[in-house]
Image (tube, rainbow, N blue to C red):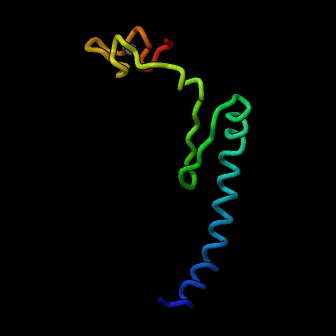
Amino acid sequence: MDVNHLTTRAAIGSPVRALLELLEAWAFDAQDARARRQGWTVHRPAPLIRVYRNPRFDTMIPCEHCAGEGVTTRGACRTCLGSGRERP
Ligand SMILES: [Zn+2]
C-alpha cells in the first residue's frame, strides 16, 4: 500500500467533500426542514440522494382491489387511485 498516495487522495478529497456538502445543503436543506416539520423521516443513503417517508404510510395496507399494484387491466386502480395502498 502506498501511504503517500493515500495522503494525497485525502488532501484532494477534503475540498471535494466540502463542496459536495455545500451543494447538498443548498439543494436539500429547505426540503429536509419542510419534511421534518411535517413529521416525515429523512434518510440520506448516498450523497445528493434523499429518501423522504411519511410514517403514516406504515398504517396503510395493500389495496385489495388491485393487490397493491395500483393498476388493473383497465388502467389505474379507481379504489386506491393508483397508489396501491388503502386505509384499513
Ligand atoms: Zn388499488
Q: Position of residue 69 (x, y in %)?
A: 35, 22
Residue at 56% from the left image edge and 91% from the top image edge: 4
Residue sticking out furthest to the left: 73
Quadrant of the picture in which ligand 1 is shown: top left
Q: Position of residue 14 (x, y in %)?
A: 65, 72
Depth check, front residue: 54 or 31 = 54
Is residue 17 shown above or below 8?
above
Residue at 44% from the left image edge and 13% from the top image edge: 80
**Quadrant hosting residue 84:** top left
Counting the numbered discs, the total is 0
Residue at 54% from the left image edge and 21% from the top image edge: 59
Residue at 50% from the left image edge and 90% from the top image edge: 2
Is residue 52 shown above or below 23?
above
Is residue 71 shown above or below 49?
above
Give the side of residue 48 with respect to residue 37, left or right.
left
Q: Position of residue 28 (x, y in %)?
A: 66, 45
**Quadrant hosting residue 82:** top left
Q: Position of residue 78 (x, y in %)?
A: 40, 9
Give the side of residue 65 with respect to residue 54, left or right.
left
